[in-house]
Image: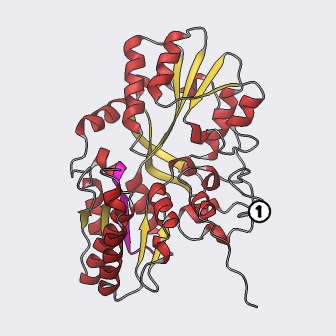
Amino acid sequence: MKYLDEYRDPALARHLLDELRETATHPWRIMEVCGGQTHTLVRQGIDELLPAGMRMIHGPGCPVCVTPLETLDRAMAIAARPGVVFTSFGDMLRVPGTDTDLLSLRARGADVRVVYTPMDAVRLAAGHPEHEVVFLAVGFETTAPANAMAVLHAARLGLRNFSVLVSHVLVPPALTALLEDPDCEVEAFLAAGHVCAVMGWREYEPIADRYRVPIVVTGFEPLDLLEGILMAVRQLESGRHEVENQYVRAVRRSGNTRAQDAVRRVFRVTDRAWRGIGALPASGLELAEEYERFDAARRFDVAGLRPAEDPECIAGAILTGARLPTDCTAYGSRCTPRHPLGAPMVSSEGTCAAFHAAGRTPARSTT
């Protein structure tokens, strides 16, 4: 496939691996932030082909996985109400809340629908004024512009039956929180190319400078990741700590300023809880005061829920890179893509799902 096969060329991959082995003199530890990057690394076996001792740490880059349990429980409470049409992207339907998931609610009669863009939900509200239409707005900076545009369009139409349940999270505060952890092992980051296509990489420069950590904006294909890893290793070997851009075909330092303007107009920065990680200051977005009338949490008064995680799930440790999916006692047995205990197993970008799809199994004891 033109413009895709070029980034999967096995000869070029071997060349990059050879150069990486020649360059690395230390068992560096590098975190890829994006769940899409994790799936490529694991599916292609790149993480197992790196120089001896070098390790990829899988970070909290799955937007579905870090959506807090409280938000999911609020979504279930709203979706179960009569007269509500609850809309979401398909990968959210099977993410478990405390007691159930959206797909199970739909099986029991709730009007839960999959949409492909938030604008689909706006059109649904405009065409069905007799229903309350709610859109579950989750994700990193990548999805925030489209959700902002949906709110702006609903405001222009004067819709009174459209609202959004917002749970947007921001990448830079998460990197800072990881680096502030005294047990952090990360020595360099691969930043998510699609996030930086929207936001640019200026926000990462103070992080690289303050914590003396290389950050390489990287794409999602095998050659993107191998080149990104090589660029990070070159910085580590030379003692540099800069932000570099591997994903030059899609990312500029300033990002997409029109998209940023829409996000700033509709949302404001707030503290946000991350599932399995906890509350991080100034790490999320909520609706600005001018657009609070579109806030589904306020409209349906679903505050005060008391979520409870499955005690066997170690999603938090997996999302921060402290543990691997194969360290979990439930992995592949009680927790599978068909019957997930936590979001990392059900999400298309989850680390547990990536390991399971690649057939990774826990190491057998030799004792």
SS state under label 1: loop
> Camera-side residue: 320 or 361?
361
Q: Position of residue 258 (x, y in %)?
A: 25, 34
Residue, disc 1 = 333
Position of 332 with respect to 235 (left or right) is right
> What residue occupies the far top of the structure in this picture?
130
Please tell me which residue is depicted at 31% across the width and 31% down the height of the picture: 262
The structure residue drawn at horizontal position 55% and vertical position 9%, both measured from the top left corner, is 129
Residue 52 on image: x %, y %: 45, 86
Q: What residue do we see at 21% from left, 48% from top?
A: 254
Give the extent of the magenta segment.
181-194
Q: Up-down: is 113 above or below 253?
A: above
Res 356 quadrant in image: bottom right
The reply, left or right, for residue 306 in relation to residue 119 is: right
The front one of 281 and 232 is 232
Q: Position of residue 363 (x, y in %)?
A: 67, 79
In which quadrant is the C terminus drawn?
bottom right
Whether residue 274 is visible to the viewer of this picture, yes or no, is no
Which of the 4 quarters of the picture holds residue 236?
A: bottom left
Image position of 275 with respect to 151: above or below: below
From where the camera sits, is residue 298 visible? yes
Residue 204, above or below 119: below
- Identify whether 345 is placed above or below 151: below
* Residue 184 within the segment the image draws in magenta: yes
Tally of numbered discs: 1
Q: Within the magenta stretch, is there residue 269?
A: no
Q: Nearer the viewer, residue 228 or 152?
A: 228
Task: Please indicate whether residue 192 sits to the left or right of residue 76 in the image.
Answer: left
Residue type (three-letter) at the residue carrying disc 1: Ser
Asked if residue 341 lies left or right of residue 354, the reply is: right
